[in-house]
Image (cartoon, coloured by chain):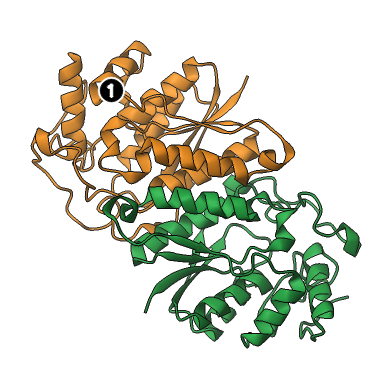
Chain colours: A green, B orange
Amino acid sequence: MKRAVCLLSGGLDSSTCLAYATREGFECYALSFDYGQRHRVELEAAARVAAALGAKRHLVATIDRRLFEGSALTGSAEVPKHHSDTELGHGIPITYVPARNTVFLSFALAWAEVLGAADIFIGVNAIDYSGYPDCRPEYIAAFERMANLATKAAVEGGSRLRIHTPLAQMSKADIVRFGAKLGLDFGLTHSCYDPDEQGRPCGECDSCLLRKKGFREAGLADKLDYVR
Amino acid sequence: MKRAVCLLSGGLDSSTCLAYATREGFECYALSFDYGQRHRVELEAAARVAAALGAKRHLVATIDRRLFEGSALTGSAEVPKHHSDTELGHGIPITYVPARNTVFLSFALAWAEVLGAADIFIGVNAIDYSGYPDCRPEYIAAFERMANLATKAAVEGGSRLRIHTPLAQMSKADIVRFGAKLGLDFGLTHSCYDPDEQGRPCGECDSCLLRKKGFREAGLADKLDYVR
């Protein structure tokens, strides 16, 4: 059974991506990160999803949060609310974390090399492109190229490393439909940037709005218990 | 004053590289890593060197060691000894750490973005090429290309990020001569893979042998107090 490292935040996208890798027959090693997120409910969701999808192992790697200083997701800045749908996905959001996917993929690469895996899955998609530079296809291709020069296998002639982005061309509605087809229990996932004390999603941050819109357009019900 | 992030292990190469960046007029932010090295004396050397060279800040970022399982530098494998000079620098050494420079440079990239720095210095050199895939010029070029697609600046039209490798074409003797010219106090640095309890370099590991050879060929005295 071929091993794969699957980046897993516990959100809709990465969970769907893990469900896909599993269906494709990979033995999946799920990798999450503790980088001082303000909301630990994200890591709890990742653990639930990894267990439900039968990941071989789930590693939560700690990343020194001092490197990510100044981001809304780790710092004290206000998470923006009440964006209209038309504003969504334009420009770099305040929730941007510096070089995040580069750090995440680097860790995935290190773990893949230790595990002897030549496949890495990441749930980036078309929605992210305009907002996050490190979600764009040209970025992923450049990372893959660099990775294939970086490792022992690159020098000793092992398998070529591949970064899989099965959701690359999908809208949020596409992802909801795809996840449903794969049998993913969306109720286990978590997407909110600003949950309340009980961990309930706010329903108003960019991430909640995008998710709601995705379910609405896909014509499917979202089981999450939104605050609003 | 332009800011630069300088990777600093506390060894001969990275210390010389930091001395060079300082002389070039950069305000230097030295970045070291605690990744479960067996010998903490390395991090102490980095702190000494950063202070002596007047680095603006020295950050020791913690990296989750579970990602680097199976390497001699972090695990329980024996550090190889008594290599002849002719064996040095051929093939991938047991001291190889999976995807290490990719992880280190990713952290440097994240910190550079936070600091608004467009320059990263790393002391890779010709000696390393044959042993470490992630020290080769083609690897560094691929990382730089990827980095320039990864960040906010890449999208918003900021300065192009540059990975500087001033020692790239140098032998160990060249580096010793270069460091001496820059006024670096080599006695502050530390290169040994296997120091004794007092932190004295063993004099027999690959790293000690390479260093001794470098000083010998440069015709300069190494102030370190080797065990052998």
B208 shown above or below A54 = above
**Local secondary structure at mark 1:** helix
Q: Nearer the viewer, residue B190 or A21?
A: A21
Q: In which quadrant will I find the C terminus of chain B?
A: top left
- Identify the residue shown where x is 62% and y is 55%: A137
- Identify the residue shown where x is 50% and y is 25%: B55
Q: Is residue A59 left or right of residue B77?
A: right
Q: Is residue B46 left or right of residue A157?
A: right
Camera sees residue B138: yes
> Residue A163: x, y in percent?
50, 61
Q: Nearer the viewer, residue B8 or A215?
A: A215
- The amino acid type of the residue labelled 1 equals Gly
B184 shown above or below B130 = above
Q: Nearer the viewer, residue A143 or B104?
A: A143
**In which quadrant of the rendered view does residue B87 lie?**
top left
- Identify the residue shown where x is 64% and y is 40%: B114
Camera sees residue A226: no
> Residue A130: x, y in percent?
75, 53
> Residue B129: x, y in percent?
29, 37
Q: Nearer the viewer, residue B206 or A89?
A: A89
Identify the residue under disc 1.
B187
> Residue A124: x, y in percent?
63, 63
B167 shown above or below B112 = above
**In which quadrant of the rendered view does residue B184 lie?**
top left
Numbered label tally:
1
- Identify the residue shown where x is 19% and y is 20%: B215
Label 1 environment density (alpha carbons within 10 Å; few <14, some 14–19, many ≥20): few
Marked residue chain, label 1: B
Q: In which quadrant will I find the N terminus of chain B?
A: top right
B194 shown above or below B71 = above
